[in-house]
Amino acid sequence: MIEITENKTDRKALAEEIAGYISEKRRTNCFLQPEDWEGILKQGKVFRMEFSGGVYLLAEKERQFDLLYFLERNTKPVSLPDMQKPVILEQVSAERTGVSPALEEWEAVGFRRYLRRKRLFLAAKNAGQESREITFCGENEQERIQMLLAESFEPYTSELPDAETLAADLWEKRVIAVRKDGKLLGFLRFGREKKISVLRQIAVLPAARGRGIGDGLLRDWLALERENIAKFQLWVREDNPPALRMYEKLGFRQDGRIAPVMIKE
Amino acid sequence: MDTEALMKILAELRPDVDFEENKELVDSGELDSFDIVSLVGELCDAYDIEIGADDIVPENFNSVEAICALITRLQED
């Protein structure tokens, strides 16, 4: 029986261990920067499972464990013991080279396919010239936004903000609003990763859909950010063709990055 | 070293990136950690080198010139 133990090493040791696996060219789904571990270790414990030819790290979150694997080239995935929360496996990959280990290999150890996303981009210079009057969500709308996020997105891999993060985004004007008669109909939350503006979430009230509100929010985002950055980026679920069409109409194109997600419950 | 082979690897890795122009590939966010991890594997295979953990840092991947310098140094080691 393979045991799962709590990881006792600190952020720095963990980052060094992972860099070691990468230089050994192990197969992995872990592309975290050393500084990202700060946030992960703050959220919950990290557990470790070692076996011949590989290591799993399980990062505990409120609803789930995120599985990070480091497998030597010929090592196949091994089974996990039963966990108290679902285990989520996200494999960010290049479409060109495919996913490794393949989804079938994870299915053989109890995972099932959950969803799949692909990444789109738009160069800032192709983001149009339109000028728009932009309004932002206020602090008084935080609860409403949290509710709409919880209703609109799958809970494990949508990178939904906690209350503290959302409050900071509202303060920094990173949540664009569409209102009618003072009522919030939709919003778009974005962030920055170096010189890239990244769409975090966009949501429109169910009753207000089909009126171009999403399209308007995206145009607001492009107009607001295009002077300050080099590129716009977003992830879209492949089972959401209307969203995909909306992005493509504005000029977004695939950049070849995909992310299938599997789950073990 | 064979720069042409490197340009081919980079173009296949990220066809949307202008590698000749951009000298801040990592600092601008164009190459992210996924790209760096993928590159490490491909460069090791293509140039028969070992890239140690200490060399997996943004400075070594910020431009084609920096990547070339890394490969050349490791080939000489």
Image (cartoon, coloured by chain):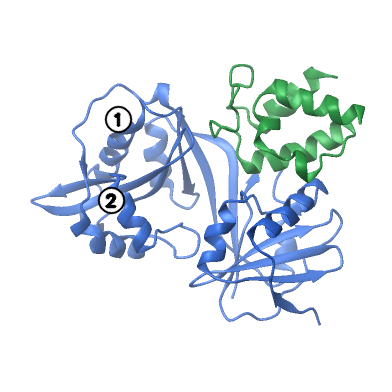
Q: Which of marks 1 and 2 is in front?
A: 2
From the viewer's perspective, is residue A95 above or below residue A264? Answer: above
Residues at marks 1 and 2, CA–CA distance in whole angstroms? 18 Å
Element marked by disc 2: helix
Quadrant where the image shows the C terminus of chain A: bottom right
> Label 1 sits on what residue type?
Ala
- Name the tint of chain A in the rendering: blue
Q: Can residue A28 be seen in this view?
A: no
Question: Around disc 1, counting alpha carbons within 10 Å, would you say few (fewer than 14), some (14 to 19), or many (20 or more)?
Answer: some
Which quadrant of the structure image shows residue A106? bottom right
> Label 2 sits on what residue type?
Leu
Q: Is residue A178 visible?
A: yes
Residue name at image x 64 percent, y 54 percent: A91
From the viewer's perspective, is residue B18 above or below residue B38? Answer: above
Residue A224 image point, x, y percent: 30, 32
Which quadrant of the structure image shows residue A122? top left
Check disc 1 and report the residue beneath it: A223
Instruction: From the rendered image, report the letter of the chain displayed in green.
Output: B
Q: Mark 2 lies on which chain?
A: A
Q: Is residue A52 left or right of residue A129?
A: right
Residue A38 image point, x, y percent: 55, 58
Residue name at image x 89 percent, y 28 percent: B75
> Viewer-proximal residue, B60 or A207?
B60
Count of labels shown? 2
Element marked by disc 1: helix
